[in-house]
Image (tube, rainbow, N blue to C red):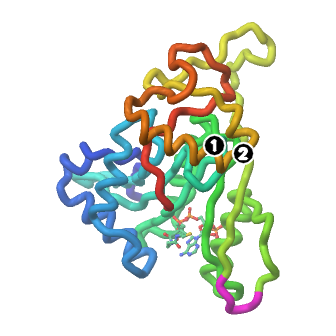
Amino acid sequence: MTTRDRWVTVGTSEDARESPSLVCRITEMVCEAYGYRRLDECEVLHRLQMGDAGCRANRVLHLAWEKCAGDDAPTLVGCCSSTVQPMWTEYGCGHWGLMVVAPAFQGSGVGSLLVAAAEARLASRKCSQIQIEYEYTSGDPTSERLLAWYEGKCGFICPQSLPAQRGRRQFRRCRKRVIKPVPENDTRRTSPAKKPDAPCPADPPTCKQGLSRVCPRLSQGLWYIASVLVPTGHCPVGSSSTKLSSREEPCKSSTHAAD
Ligand SMILES: CC(C)(COP(=O)(O)OP(=O)(O)OC[C@H]1O[C@@H](n2cnc3c(N)ncnc32)[C@H](O)[C@@H]1OP(=O)(O)O)[C@@H](O)C(=O)NCCC(=O)NCCS
């Protein structure tokens, strides 16, 4: 039996520099799995560059790798994106998408590994919910399998689903709550005085969040305008040195686009 290792990384432009064929391999894998030209190399490179911001990154491209005993180098076997704050969800609702496994590796657990990596990242960035979207055709075996996975095993719920009509394509927008596992040695329950986990040192400054709770869409629009007018990376309102509560919104400096 061959020993095989699988792991997931966050892609960066350094990966693309180190392996000049990587961008092309990702592009081909995505297009082959989807069966149409879902994206091009420019977009893939752009997505890898987003990972350069490390734990400040908003959207990243997760890459799944496999290496069998005797292999010289790991093989790219899948990818997916995760976004802490997309433009189309309210504050606190992250997103994953572009879920793709190289056809030769489908059905062997790579997709589940990618979901786990994306959801762990969103949970670590304090998302309380996750949204996904996908197209579903009732009666189509692949589609039914996907629905059973997303809305079964993965635990998503599609609140506004219309009655399925056989053969008719449907857009499904699903949500789930993020359940953060409590580490076994976590003392927070027994010791309320314990300080919360230290934030990621590279996290952007946070800003007062009040408006986003009242009207998330208006708030997002204002954030966008403010970030264009104030290109310093500082919070456009309040002071970045002000001590702020944990329910506050991160400054938006990353690019947002549909997955
Ligand atoms: C859907 C996909 C990402 C799943 O990845 P995977 O590595 O095959 O998944 P896993 O082996 O971890 O299995 C998880 C679930 O995925 C689903 N799945 C696996 N292969 C699948 C396939 N070829 N088509 C549809 N769903 C599939 C199954 O529901 C499976 O659960 P099950 O084994 O209990 O039935 C992968 O098949 C793929 O890339 N498909 C083409 C692209 C696509 O449709 N992406 C989703 C767009 S929304």
Q: Which residue is label 2 attached to? A: 215
Q: What residue is at 52 percent from the left and 48 percent from the top?
A: 83
The response on whether ligand 1 sits within 8 Å of label 1 is no
Residues drawn in magenta: 165-169
**Label 1 environment density (alpha carbons within 10 Å; few <14, some 14–19, many ≥20):** some
With respect to residue 33, does 7 lie above or below?
above
- Work out whether residue 6 can be spotted: no
Which of the 4 image quarters holds residue 150?
Answer: bottom right
What secondary structure is found at the residue carrying circle 2?
loop
The answer to the question of whether label 2 and label 1 lie on touching residues, with beta carbons closer than 8 A, is yes
Q: Residue furthest front?
A: 229
Q: Quadrant of ligand 1?
A: bottom right
- Marks 2 and 1, how far apart at CA: 6 Å
Q: Main secondary structure of the magenta part?
A: loop
Q: What residue is at 75 percent from the left and 7 percent from the top?
A: 193
Q: Is residue 87 left or right of residue 178?
A: left
Give the image location of residue 70, x and y in percent: 26, 53
Split into 4 quadrants, where in the image is the N terminus? bottom left
Q: Residue furthest bottom?
A: 167
